[in-house]
């Protein structure tokens, strides 16, 4: 087996077949793959947020040149607890944009590929001071193999592994009656019927690029209004985030991956959802609704329509992705865990992080709060 290290996205278009085409084929053979693993997602994120980072796309091939595995890494300087660190991480996780990040490994070959990736990282210790894998699925078959191998190669180097969040999901098709019951919970039917009494309710997936571009602006304003009502800032206060979503829509819509949905009452947009659909999985990502219609519960009505869409389309999963919001547990029948795994070359950095976590636990205990994401040892 041999490594190829990509440092420029333009290299992905070279060759016949191109690396981009090989990547797409690998995705179909990898057990842990999602829309966040597609090159369309990764490249789009990089154009908006990767300007200060160095790309390290690792490709592992067999002796015949066939792509067996890939690791979408990047290295960037980042301030962590007041110290400048050179951080090695998965692309698109530095700002938590990608809800999941993992190695892409052909199903059945993790024992061959993961030690090679760990060896590459160990050989390049001069390039990084902190390895930070954010939003790493705990159920990934790669996590225990990689962590064990890297610990063997870097004896004495400190590491930690915490559970950042739950990731609730509704696995569909196990029991069709239960699925329909989930989409017809009393609260969902009550809010839907109440809206219908006020006029015409329309649920639509927007597919026209021009309309998507126009309505994204309304989506941004709805998100800002709802966050302001709750006393928080919106990510869309940042023009870069707005441009990222526009660019992401342009990249994913032609591929059939985007599901930008709207709920309207008498033609007025009450709510939007910016989500994805790939390989039978619907991915919940970013909702927004008009704050002045909050008493109509448009978010719940939107969920009902999305669930019905997934059931009617024969999808196998409605993935609510990362986050411990209460509504996600109401509709889920499976709870996954999402990890953050860090390796510290600097002993002091590990001690500072350990102290911070200990103080956080003490603070929550004093306030009588239940432990939340990011504090549980894995």
Image (cartoon, rainbow, N blue to C red):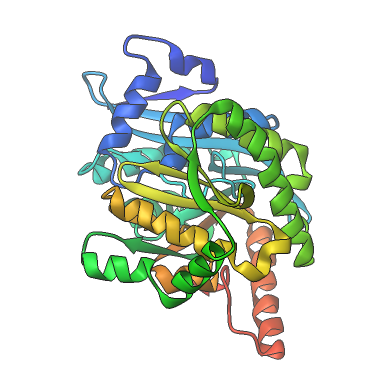
**Residue 192 place in picture, x, y as percent:** 49, 66
Quadrant the C terminus occupies? bottom left
**Residue 189 place in picture, x, y as percent:** 44, 70
The answer to whether residue 230 is above or below residue 208 is below
| The image quarter in which residue 255 lies | top left
Q: Nearer the viewer, residue 213 or 246?
A: 213
Q: Nearer the viewer, residue 120 or 218?
A: 218
| The image quarter in which residue 238 lies | top right
Tell whether 232 sits left or right of 10: right
**Residue 82 place in picture, x, y as percent:** 79, 55
The answer to whether residue 326 is above or below residue 314 is below
Q: How many marks?
A: 0
Quadrant the N terminus occupies? top left
Residue appearing at x 76%, y 52% in the figure: 83
Tell whether 265 sits left or right of 236: left
Residue appearing at x 40%, y 74% in the figure: 185
Residue appearing at x 34%, y 59% in the figure: 139
Residue appearing at x 30%, y 61% in the figure: 171
Residue 15 appears in the rendering? yes
Tell whether 102 sits left or right of 374: left
**Residue 282 place in picture, x, y as percent:** 39, 49
Residue 162 appears in the rendering? no
Tell whether 238 sits left or right of 253: right
């Amino acid at each position: 087996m041999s490594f190829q290290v990509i440092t420029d996205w333009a290299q992905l278009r070279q060759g016949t077949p191109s690396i981009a085409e090989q990547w797409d084929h690998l995705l179909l053979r990898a057990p842990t793959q999602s829309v966040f693993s597609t090159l369309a997602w990764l490249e789009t994120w990089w154009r908006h947020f990767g300007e200060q980072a160095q790309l390290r796309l690792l490709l592992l091939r067999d002796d015949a040149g066939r792509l067996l595995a890939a690791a979408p890494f990047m290295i960037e300087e980042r301030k962590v607890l007041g110290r400048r660190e050179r951080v090695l991480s998965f692309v698109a996780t530095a700002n938590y944009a990608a809800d999941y990040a993992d190695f892409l490994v052909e199903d059945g070959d993790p024992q061959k590929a993961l030690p090679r990736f760990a060896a590459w990282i160990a050989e390049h210790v001069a390039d990084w001071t902190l390895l930070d894998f954010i939003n790493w699925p705990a159920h990934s078959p790669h996590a225990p193999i990689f962590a064990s191998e890297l610990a063997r190669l870097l004896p004495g180097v400190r590491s930690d592994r915490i559970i950042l969040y739950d990731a609730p999901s509704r696995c569909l098709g196990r029991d069709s009656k239960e699925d329909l019951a989930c989409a017809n919970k009393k609260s969902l039917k009550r809010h839907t019927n109440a809206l219908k009494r006020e006029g015409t309710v329309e649920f639509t997936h927007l597919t026209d690029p021009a309309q998507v571009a126009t309505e994204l602006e309304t989506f941004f304003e709805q998100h800002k209004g709802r966050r302001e009502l709750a006393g928080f800032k919106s990510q869309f206060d940042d023009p870069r985030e707005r441009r990222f979503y526009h660019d992401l829509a342009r990249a994913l819509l032609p591929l059939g991956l985007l599901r930008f949905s709207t709920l309207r009452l008498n033609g007025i947009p009450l709510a939007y959802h910016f989500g994805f659909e790939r390989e039978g999985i619907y991915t919940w990502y970013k909702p927004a609704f008009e704050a002045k219609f909050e008493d109509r519960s448009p978010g719940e009505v939107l969920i009902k329509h999305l669930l019905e869409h997934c059931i009617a389309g024969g999808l196998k999963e409605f993935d609510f992705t990362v986050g411990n919001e209460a509504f996600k547990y109401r509709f889920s029948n499976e709870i996954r865990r999402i990890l953050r795994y860090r390796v510290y070359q600097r002993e002091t950095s590990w001690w500072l992080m350990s102290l911070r976590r200990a103080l956080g636990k003490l603070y929550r205990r004093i306030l009588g709060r239940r432990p939340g994401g990011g504090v549980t040892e894995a």
